[in-house]
Amino acid sequence: MKKLKHITKICEELYNSEGAGAVYDHANEFIEKQGDSNVHYRNHCKGCEANTPSWHDTCLVCGQPTEPLNFKVVHTGFNKEAGREEVQIHYGEHTNIFLIKTDEGFIVDVYGQDDVVATMAVWDDDLNPDED
């Protein structure tokens, strides 16, 4: 009976023989075949100084512990469809945070999986009060 190698062992061997690129390629292929699995890019490795593929909080490139990334900037700039300047940030699995620029200041919208959870307006006048 042939014993299967664990992904961490395969990636260690790939790194030693072919470099980090081979680990990324293998992890991408694994994720594509397995779908939502324990191998993902949701963690940051301080050793690699990058968002690396990881398995159970272990970097598949260097083997060091990784830290979960909670915030991911998805979009920043002008949204032509909405006609406004905005920043969109994903937080965790099901949360979106929008910073929306208006003529009077900006709005912070926090969405859960489907609906707005909280909204806050910040006015330019409050940020830059007159010197009276």
Image (cartoon, rainbow, N blue to C red):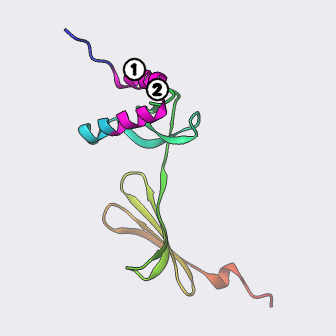
Res 54 seen here: no
> How many callouts does the rendering have?
2
Residue 18 seen by the camera: yes
Instruction: Please give the name of the residue rendered at 80% of the width and 91% of the height, measured from the top-left corner.
Output: 132
Amino acid type shown at disc 1: Lys
Image vertical order of residue 103 relative to residue 114, above or below: below
Nearer to me, 104 or 85: 85
* Residue 111 placement: quadrant: bottom left
- N-terminal-most mark, 2 or 1: 1
- Magenta stretch in the rendered image: 6-28
Mark 2, residues whose alpha carbon is within 10 Å: few (<14), some, or many (≥20)?
some
Depicted 126 relative to depicted 55: above or below: below
Magenta span: helix, strand or loop, mainly?
Answer: helix
Q: Residue at x 22, y 11 (%)?
A: 2
Residue 124 image offset from top left, x and y in percent: 63, 82
Q: Which of 74 and 122 is in front in this view?
A: 74
> Looking at the image, which is closer to me, 90 or 107?
90
Residue 31 picture location, percent across and down: 31, 39
Horizontal side of 122 relative to 20 (left or right) equals: right
Would you name the residue on which mark 2 appears? 15
Q: Name the residue under label 1.
A: 9
